[in-house]
Amino acid sequence: MRQNSLLPIIDDDTQVLILGSMPSVQSLEKQQYYGNARNHFWPIIAAITGENITEDYAQRIALLKEQGIGLWDAIQSCERQGSLDANIRNEVANDFSSLFQRYPQIKAVLFNGAKSFDVFKRHVGLEILAGRDYEKMPSTSPIPGKNIKTFEQKIEAWRTLEQYLK
């Protein structure tokens, strides 16, 4: 079954763009980035910003925007059974050329896991990031991958985000 990603969470104040691969089935059903309560994304953001993250999605997005953080996915659409990145087939990348033309102030792109980085590199190309910082981060997914890190190790790695916060 073909799945489509969510619209970007981005505005003229976005300094750093966090790119996932493709939202989970649960996130797509909720129409919320990192909508699976077991995903480590929101607890990591809480640890780095020192802010209390509520269950209210609008408040979560407002916090990200206040901090200059944007969200999107490397994949615009794909075929996938379930939520695992390993099951993604026939992916189509999002239009980053248009995005970076519209939002030239973005200083950095952080890839949430290997799949988002690999898809971006293969379908978009790293050349488009010339003049911007970028880094492949450990996935915030609760599903153990081949590069298993503890929650604390993930927080430490994601601290690179601090240099871009407002």
Image (cartoon, rainbow, N blue to C red):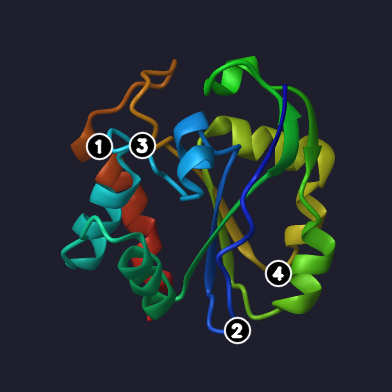
For discs 1 and 2, the disc positioned in front in the rendered view:
2
Q: Considering only order in the chain, which callout, 3 or 2, is on the residue closer to the N terminus?
A: 2
Horizontal side of residue 119 vs 56, given as left or right: right
Give the residue at x 34% y 66%: 162
Q: Quadrant of residue 23?
A: top right
Find the distance from the CA under tag 3 to the CA under tag 1.
20 Å
Q: Secondary structure at mark 3?
A: loop
Question: Which residue is at the front of the view, 151 or 127?
Answer: 151
Q: Considering only order in the chain, which callout, 2 or 4, is on the residue closer to the N terminus?
A: 2
Question: Which residue in the protein does label 1 denote?
Answer: 153
Find the distance from the CA under tag 2 to the CA under tag 3.
28 Å
Give the residue at x 45% y 44%: 30
Q: Considering only order in the chain, which callout, 4 or 3, is on the residue closer to the N terminus?
A: 3
For discs 2 and 3, the disc positioned in front in the rendered view:
3
| Amino acid type, residue under disc 2 in the picture | Asp
Horizontal side of residue 125 vs 52, given as left or right: right
Question: Which residue in the protein does label 3 denote?
Answer: 36
Residue 25 pos. (x, y %): 52, 30
For discs 3 and 4, the disc positioned in front in the rendered view:
3
Residue 106 pos. (x, y %): 61, 73
Question: Which residue in the protein does label 2 denote?
Answer: 12
Q: Considering only order in the chain, which callout, 4 or 1, is on the residue closer to the N terminus?
A: 4
Q: Secondary structure at mark 4?
A: loop
Q: Secondary structure at mark 1?
A: helix
